[in-house]
Image (spheres, rainbow, N blue to C red):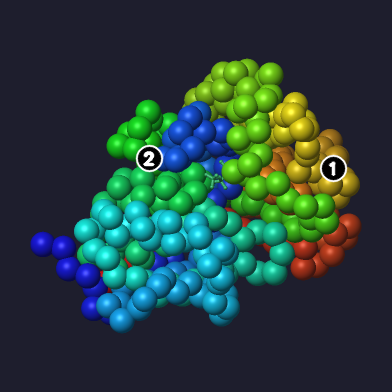
């Protein structure tokens, strides 16, 4: 029998960086993607979330980084809690306390770690004892990229065709080869187009969308093989190509837009310059101007110094492979 936890439950989930991107949904409601995607979970950036369902609450309370969120700001969290209540067959409201652990303030907070941690804490607090596959299906309902943050290391999100078949699975949770990511925090000045809106525009308007699906499925297989063979060059090159193929969809959407700013372009050129100097490193970008550089651990310090001289100390962060979700009892 399911029993609501009589104490707060805390979950910790790390964010992830997609090497093969998810960009477009087949089903906007259930968040079923148009393609398989693959990511590396990162150890430095994570979210910690505590949830308790309480009979005395008359509404859900969401406290994010010590501030109570308004009705509108907490809408996605409350919709997610409704889904958990429905699964568990309960109707109590919840108190949710969530904190993002990102070394600097700007730009790297993510819905991936956020909804993965919320899925873990809320499901257990509601008395559901989900296995990791079902947790990843639940996290998917909050944000697509959260599906993969249930697992550590390299994880894939299998597209599937419905709620039951669209989930993540681990590829290599504790890679023995030393992969690092150097994250550049490059502030966005222009108004941000969310990934949710951006990918919908691509599906509906980009004439290149079907080519993206074809290319990303091929990239998925190639990166999987690269992981199996610990082939860094193949992994890095394919990830960089895949990122640019995704960003080509923003340029070819109607209205067209881009997540690049001048600093992003400078950073991408600097990565290419480093390659000419013989340092193997590759860039990727998501729905914002920050550039993440995929490299081998042994080169991470050199790359960090190179970028710190242009972008400043606090703007350059080094991280490695992180673990999957953990949930308190
Ligand atoms: C570029 O997971 O934020 O980071 O499912 O609408 O919440 P929703 O989108 P979201 O999109 C992530 C897009 C991406 C690529 C990726 O992480 O695969």
> Which quarter holds ligand 1?
top right
Q: Which residue in the structure is indicated by mark 1?
A: 265
Q: Residue furthest front?
A: 58
Quadrant into which the N terminus falls: bottom left
Q: Is residue 3 above or below residue 303?
A: below
Asked whether disc 1 touches disc 2, contact meaning CB atoms under 8 Å apart, the reply is no
The residue singled out by tag 2 in the image is: 167
- Element type at mark 2: strand
Task: Give coordinates of residue 291: x percent, y percent.
Answer: 73, 48
How far apart are the two marked residues, 1 and 2, measured between alpha carbons?
A: 34 Å
For the question of whether residue 302 can be seen, the reply is no
Vertical arrangement, residue 94 with respect to residue 156, above or below: below
Q: Residue at x 69, y 69 (%)?
A: 104
State the residue at coordinates (78%, 37%): 257
**Residue 284 in sight:** yes
Residue at horizontal 36 percent and vertical 65 percent from the top: 121
Image-based side of 108 in relation to 129, left or right: right
Q: Position of residue 238 (x, y in %)?
A: 63, 30
Camera-nearest residue between 4 and 113: 4
Eye-nearest disc, 1 or 2:
2
Question: Does residue 243 appear left or right of residue 79 in this picture?
Answer: right
Q: Residue at 46% across / 57% down in the picture? A: 115
Task: Work out whether mark 1 precedes mark 2 in sequence or the reverse, and give the earlier one.
Answer: 2
Q: Is residue 17 left or right of residue 249?
A: left
Please identify the quarter of the rendering in which residue 203 is found. Answer: top right
Instruction: Judge from the rendering whether residue 137 lies leftward or rightward of residue 238; answer left or right.
Output: left
Q: Count the numbered circles shown.
A: 2
Q: Is residue 267 above or below residue 49?
A: above
Give the number of the disc on residue 292.
none
Q: Position of residue 316 (x, y in %)?
A: 75, 61
């Amino acid at each position: 029998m399911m029993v609501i936890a009589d104490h707060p439950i805390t979950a910790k989930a790390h964010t992830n960086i997609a090497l093969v991107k998810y960009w477009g949904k087949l089903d906007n409601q259930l968040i079923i993607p148009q393609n398989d995607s693959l990511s590396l979970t990162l150890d430095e950036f994570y979210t910690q979330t505590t949830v308790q369902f309480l009979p005395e609450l008359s509404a859900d309370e969401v406290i994010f980084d010590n501030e109570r969120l308004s009705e509108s700001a907490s809408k996605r969290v409350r919709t997610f809690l409704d889904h958990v209540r429905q699964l568990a067959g309960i109707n109590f409201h919840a108190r949710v306390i969530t904190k993002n652990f990102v070394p600097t303030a700007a730009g790297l907070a993510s819905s991936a770690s956020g909804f993965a941690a919320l899925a873990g804490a809320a499901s257990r607090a509601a008395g559901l004892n989900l296995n990791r596959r079902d947790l990843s299906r639940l996290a998917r309902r909050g944000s697509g990229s959260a599906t993969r943050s249930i697992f550590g290391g390299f994880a894939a999100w299998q597209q599937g065709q419905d709620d039951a078949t669209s989930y993540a699975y681990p590829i290599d949770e504790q890679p023995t080869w030393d992969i690092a990511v150097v994250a550049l925090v490059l502030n966005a000045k222009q108004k941000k187009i969310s990934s949710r809106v951006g990918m919908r525009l691509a599906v509906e308007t980009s004439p290149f969308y079907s080519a993206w699906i074809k290319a990303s499925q091929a990239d998925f297989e190639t990166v999987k093989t690269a992981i199996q063979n610990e082939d860094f060059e193949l992994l890095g090159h394919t990830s960089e190509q895949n990122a640019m193929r995704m960003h080509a969809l923003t340029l070819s959407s109607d209205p067209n837009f881009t997540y690049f700013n001048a600093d992003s372009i400078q950073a991408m050129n600097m990565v290419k310059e480093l390659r000419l100097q013989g340092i193997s490193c590759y860039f990727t970008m998501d729905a914002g101007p920050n550039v993440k550089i995929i490299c081998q651990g042994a080169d991470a310090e050199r790359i960090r110094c190179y970028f710190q001289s242009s972008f400043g100390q606090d703007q350059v962060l080094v991280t490695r492979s992180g673990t999957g979700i953990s949930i308190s009892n």
